[in-house]
Image (cartoon, rainbow, N blue to C red):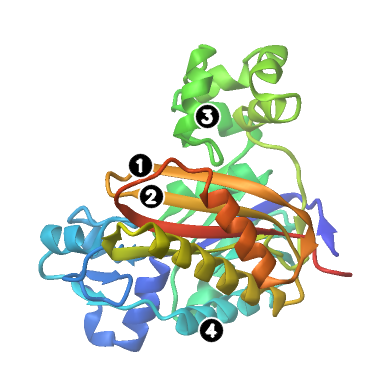
């Protein structure tokens, strides 16, 4: 593992990545509203938007939205199926381009990475990165600059699309202080509601919140870490160690609600076996099983169980998943089922 506590951290985020890859393959789509998701058929139920081009977003199309809703909002949009292999290849080209610089690259997904760099002119480096990525991959990106990952990631939000922005300790509070805590990367609505109970509503409130009170409310590790987020984040280094998932999941949204308990059990067993087989093929070992159930009313519950001992046997995981399923209250109509397995770190 190589780590760097260089002077600057840059966050590189590709613009409308999936849609941009599709436009590269179909240049005639440039400038048109493009929606990527599912099998690309908005007439089929229960398929969702993976990404939308900026032209589609102007009509209110957003990731996670049902394709049918996207079609109503933007009837002239071009709908395309997701193509994982194409996105993998495009992402690999971008990350290889980032590694052509004398920097440390920490990949965070298809379309984003942190870059650790020791430089006196981070803006110049950011523009060089943008230009080289565009030249070699024909993809546009935004670059955020900061002294921490949180600052860099947040700055990217101000830079998109296709720009460069910087946030530092000196400018963090002036820029973020009056914004709601949900403006901070890593704080969602649920945490925000709990913070509100403590009288914490803005980033400024969080930065000056009582350390001990946060520890009591959220625990001795999470509570104080929330205050660090309010102050602009910690100085965790950028590392080039490949990201290794600690879990893997598989879920299905059904075109027609499941109503037969036997069918529900069969589906949970299938999902558990399939997700286990996929991780075992990569040399991973399963330690915990989570089951997700979403009813026709969109009520979603998660339950989990630790295995008696780590296993690579899909039958053992499937059996435990069914035990977890039995802990749910009976539901007459189920629209989604999912199984997530937690994994031991890989050997070595």
| 3 or 1: mark nearer the eye | 1
Q: Earlier in the sequence, mark 2 or mark 3?
A: 3
| Quarter of the C terminus within the rendering | bottom right
Q: Picture coordinates of residue 27 (x, y %)?
A: 28, 86
Which is more foreground, mark 4 or mark 3?
A: 3
Closer to us: 138 or 290: 290
x 62%, y 76%: residue:
278
Q: Secondary structure at mark 4?
A: helix
Mark 3 is surrounded, within 10 Å at the Cα level, by few (under 14), some (14 to 19) or many (20 or more) other residues, namely: some
Question: Label for residue 299?
Answer: 1
Q: Which label's residue is closer to the chain start, 4 or 1?
A: 4
Query: What residue lies at 34% left-to-right and 72% top-to-bottom?
Result: 19
Of 5 and 316, the residue lying toward us = 316
Q: Please identify the quadrant where the N terminus is shown.
A: bottom right
User: Which residue was labeled with disc 4?
Assistant: 89
For the residues labelled 4 and 3, the Cα–Cα distance comes to 36 Å
Q: Nearer the viewer, residue 143 or 190?
A: 190
In the structure shown, which secondary structural element does the residue marked by tag 2 occupy?
strand
Q: Which mark is residue 294?
A: 2
Relative placement, left or right, of 342 versus 153 is right
- In primary-sequence order, the first of circles 4 and 3 is 4
Say left or right for 57 vs 107.
Answer: left
Residue carrying label 3:
191
């Amino acid at each position: 593992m190589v780590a760097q506590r260089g002077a600057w951290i840059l966050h590189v985020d590709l613009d409308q990545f999936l849609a941009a890859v599709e436009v590269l393959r179909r240049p005639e789509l440039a400038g048109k509203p493009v929606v990527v998701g599912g099998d690309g058929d908005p007439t089929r139920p229960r398929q969702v938007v993976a990404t939308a081009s900026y032209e589609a977003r102007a009509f209110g199309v957003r990731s996670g939205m049902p394709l049918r809703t996207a079609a109503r909002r933007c009837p002239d949009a071009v709908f395309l199926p997701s193509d994982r292999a194409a996105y993998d290849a495009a992402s690999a080209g971008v990350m290889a381009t980032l590694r052509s610089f004398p920097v440390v690259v920490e990949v965070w997904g298809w379309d984003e990475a942190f870059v650790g760099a020791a430089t006196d002119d981070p803006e110049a480096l950011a523009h060089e990165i943008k230009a080289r990525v565009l030249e070699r991959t024909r993809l546009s990106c935004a670059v955020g600059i900061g002294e921490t990952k949180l600052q860099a990631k947040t700055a990217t939000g101000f830079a998109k699309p296709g720009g460069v922005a910087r946030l530092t300790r000196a400018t963090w509070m002036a820029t973020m202080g009056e914004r709601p805590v949900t403006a901070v990367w890593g704080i969602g609505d649920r945490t925000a509601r709990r913070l509100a109970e403590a009288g914490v509503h803005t980033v400024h409130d969080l930065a000056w919140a009582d350390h001990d009170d946060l520890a009591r409310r959220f625990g001795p590790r999470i509570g104080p870490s929330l205050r660090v987020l309010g102050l602009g984040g910690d100085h965790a280094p950028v590392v080039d160690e490949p990201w290794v998932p600690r879990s893997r999941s598989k879920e299905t949204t059904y075109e027609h609600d499941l109503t037969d308990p036997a069918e529900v059990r069969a589906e949970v067993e299938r999902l558990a076996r399939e997700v286990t087989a996929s991780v075992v093929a990569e040399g991973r070992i399963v330690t915990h099983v989570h089951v997700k159930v979403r009813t026709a009313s969109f009520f979603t519950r998660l339950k989990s169980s630790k295995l008696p001992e780590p296993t690579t046997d899909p039958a053992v995981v499937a059996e435990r998943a069914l035990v977890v399923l039995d802990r749910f209250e009976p539901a007459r109509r189920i629209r989604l089922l999912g199984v997530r397995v937690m994994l031991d770190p890989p050997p070595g």
